[in-house]
Amino acid sequence: MVFSSSTFMFVFLPIFFILYYIVPFKAKNIVLCIFSLVFYAWGEPVYILLMVFSSIVDYMNGICIEKFPGKKIVFLVISVCVNLSMLGFFKYSTLLISTFNDVTGASLTVPNLALPIGISFYTFQTMSYSIDVYRGKVKTEHNFIDFMTYVSMFPQLIAGPIVRYSVVGAELHERTIDFNSFEAGMRRFLIGLFKKVLIANSVGAVFTDIQNVGIKGQSALTLWLGILAFSLQIYFDFSGYSDMAIGIGRMIGFTFPENFNYPYIAKSVSEFWRRWHMSLTTWFRDYVFIPLGGSRCSVGRNILNILVVWALTGFWHGAQWNFMLWGVYFGVILITEKYVLKSVLEKIPSAILHIYVCVMAMIGWVIFSFDKVSDIFSYVVGMFNFANPVDDKALFIFGQYKVVFVVAMLFSTPVAGWLIKKAGNRYEKAIKVISPVVYIGLFIISVAMIISESYNPFLYFRF
């Protein structure tokens, strides 16, 4: 646990913003770095040393790559090995050793390690910096405080988006901080807060209830409603965090990359992954898929490349085999779309394609959300158990949450934004008056829900 939501909003942020805005520009990175380290140390007082160590390693590697170009491959290998070793030891050693024991009958001691928060994100950021310096795509950062600020920047430290140095390197040294940016960032932050508290938490209660009750005996409609709820929950939870991170970044003068672009309106699974967690998708594309040969190779090699990348993408999400299965599942679908279904998909109406993508995504979320293969199998089979299509629980869930489902599905598409924009153009003066009132009202409701509920962290905190 890093900060509770209330502590973060009412204690940490106000103090940070006051100090950040009153100090001269030369001191802003120092303030940001200190507060970012405090933010991380609040929940990870020991593992903060791990993040600092990773930063020192890649800071020095960048300098060495610049100073010794003839041996730069050595320092790149050091960066990759150190970061992947850290990630492998702290995130995967328990799974790998326990699996080895199960397969061989050995009795090796299984370490009980707490997962350092955000390690999957900051190791990818520091590693991408070393790779980009090696490739000559970015200049070496010589100021360690500025580099440490880049790595530890609290808005996106815990759950992304994955920010490359090439995106914010210039802004570390020179950026615009004004009222317009602050206002735009505040609006974006509040939108993310509303997504998390008002939508993700509300709709997520459906799937949590089904998990607590168990899969056995549930009707097909109950299970479909459950995984629909989780699909909406994880979207609004994660995109909400990204909005909050992008919003705070904007408020302090940084432009973080967009991480979501309405993935559920995609017309193919390939397009879905160009719209979902875009910073991770492009990271694997640029640093794994293309170096492996990308698509400019034989069909067999391309298929292998896709499977490798998606197995790694799945495994990146967590140290359970269901994540590997989840990655391979999507890898197989992408290969099928590219080499088997491409011409067929082009002829199918858009509405049918949207349904196809949503069904494939929801089955994927079943794999994602259950650790045991038996539970995954039972859930998917139950979704298509037409001998038990509807029960009282399904009708109760639909009646209790129909408004939440409608609102969530509406805001998971550009339709809601289009309607708001159209109303703004037509009733500009009224919207200017109403908009602040709506934001304040939703903020008050969100705060009330945060205070009344137990701590409910973002889903991607565990990755």
Image (tube, rainbow, N blue to C red):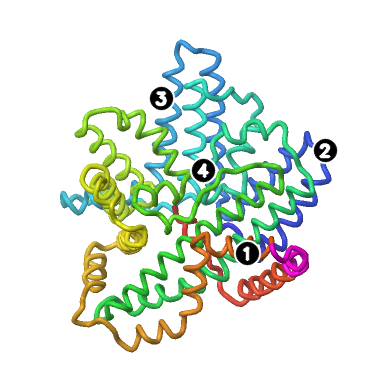
Range drawn in magenta:
426-436
Mark 4: amino acid? Ile
Residue 217 vertical position relative to residue 121 in the rendered view, above or below? below
**How far apart are the alpha carbons under marks 2 and 3?**
39 Å
Between tags 3 and 4, which lies in front? 4
Q: Element at badge 2?
A: loop
- Ranked by sequence position, the earlier of labels 2 and 3 is 2
Q: Which residue is mark 3?
A: 77
- In the rendered image, residue 4, in percent from the top left (x then y), is placed at 61, 64
Residue under label 2: 24
Residue 376 is situated, as x and y percent measured from the top left of the image, at 26, 65
- Camera-nearest label, 2 or 3: 2
* Residue 426 visible to the viewer: yes
Rounded to the nearest angstrom, the CA distance separating label 1 from label 3 is 50 Å
Viewer-nearest residue: 123 or 46:
123
**Of tags 2 and 4, which is closer to the observer?**
4
Label whose residue precedes the other's in the sequence (2 or 1): 2
Disc 1 is placed on an element classified as helix
Question: Which residue, given by chain and number where applicable, does mark 1 sit on?
Answer: 420
Say which label, 3 or 4, has the lower sequence index: 3
For the point 42% across and 70% down, the residue is: 229
- Sequence order check: which comes first, mark 4 or mark 1? 4
* Secondary element at image label 4: loop
Picture quarter containing residue 11?
bottom right
| Marks 2 and 1, how far apart at CA | 39 Å
Q: Nearer the viewer, residue 135 or 355?
A: 355
